[in-house]
Amino acid sequence: MDERRRPPELLRVSLDVTAVPTLPAGAGQYTLQLAGALADRPDVDLVVVARAADPDRWRGLAPRSRVLATAPGPRPLRLAWEQVGLPGILRRAEVAVHHGPHYTMPERSPVPAVVTVHDLSFFESPAWHERSKVHLFRRAIRVAARRAAVVVCPSRATALELARWCRMEAEVMVAHHGVDISRFSPEEAEPGADAAVLAGLDPRLGAGAPFLVCVGTLEPRKDVPTLVRSFARVAGRHPDALLVLAGGPGWGSRAVDEAVAASGSAHRVVRTGYVPDGAVPALLRTATAVVYPALYEGFGLPALEALACGAPLVTTSGTAMEEVAGAAALLVPPGDPAALADVLDRVLAGGGADPERRRLGREIAARHTWAASAARHVDAYRAAAGSRG
């Protein structure tokens, strides 16, 4: 057979999904989407390692894969199990490569390991996290840098930061996240579908009120308090506009509560809590603009999803979001309420609807599929498998 036409060797890969919560965001969504994309590949024999109480979700997502639901639920027990119990499971499953998609890996892994390091915020800005997490994940990242065969980073910015903070023995590969362009698109499923979804979140949204939306867990690095204060500066000039905060509360979300209470515009801030996956595209494509003012991200998935929906995107310069979105986004310096207020004023006055910027955004999104991301991960797995011995 012509070597160029020989099908790639089937690679058995284990994927640790035990850190994905019931209501996933960020890294949890990454793991969900990656599992589904890997399961669809004919060159990957996927073994999904899940919590004992959580097998059905993964069997539904990856029906052709083998699901080993054995891990305990609580984080301390799960992390101990990863070191003590998981190595034996990997041996018995006869996997070629193990992937830890959330910073950690078995330190005595019997097979080459790939570890995803989403960002270096535990080093860059530890005050954004609970103290116990800082110690845990700093150590985990250093272990991955030394003991993993390959470390996957979601952006070049993260890869550079990793090399700055850690002594690297692992190979580093960049694999951008993806977006499901069948769901995240400018077109609603049928006329009136988006309005019905939005009305379920708040009647004013369903009635067509103009709004800015920020999607994501409310945590310090998202800098939602600055967004609230910036919106309050311009709210008087746009009396019908609303600010929608679409995300559940995370650690440190009290600062958001305080900013809303002090804004003088609390009645115009819609807090939806965690938004089901099916409602997120409706919010993005209907918004006057999507605002993602994060001080720091490893990738910033909501920004890519906004581009796929054809929404005007406001995000921060010098970040991974600028790396991905580039000229398709309106960029402001991180943590600058005056600059952000100026851009919000402009987009609410109609200045965000630039057809060329939207065209570029959709072009960028079309290149960032989950299938493309999975292909890059498979490159990492093959590199890791080739490192043995």
Image (cartoon, rainbow, N blue to C red):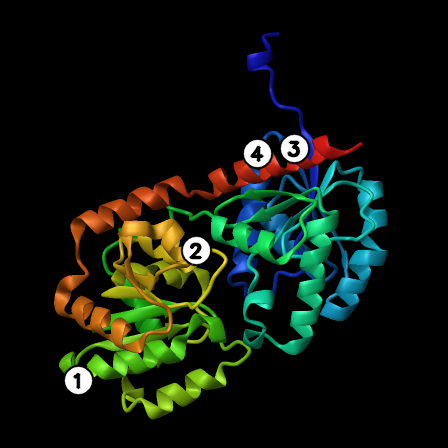
Task: Please report contact status of discs 4 and 2: CB closer than 8 Å, yes or no.
Answer: no
Instruction: Name the quadrant containing residue 380.
Output: top right
Label 1 crowd bin: few (<14), some (14–19), many (20+), radius 10 Å = few
Local secondary structure at mark 2 = helix
Q: How far is the residue under mark 4 from the one under mark 3?
A: 14 Å
Q: Nearer the viewer, mark 2 or mark 1?
A: 2
Mark 3 vs 2, N-terminal side: 2
Q: How far is the residue under mark 4 from the one under mark 2?
A: 28 Å
Tell me, for residue 320, which label it has, or none.
2
Quick check: 364 left or right of 101?
Answer: left
Mark 4 vs 1, N-terminal side: 4
Mark 1 vs 3, N-terminal side: 1
Local secondary structure at mark 3 = helix
Q: How far is the residue under mark 2 from the one under mark 1?
A: 32 Å
Q: Amino acid at mark 4?
A: Arg
Q: Position of residue 51 (x, y in %)?
A: 72, 59
Q: Which residue is mark 1?
A: 236
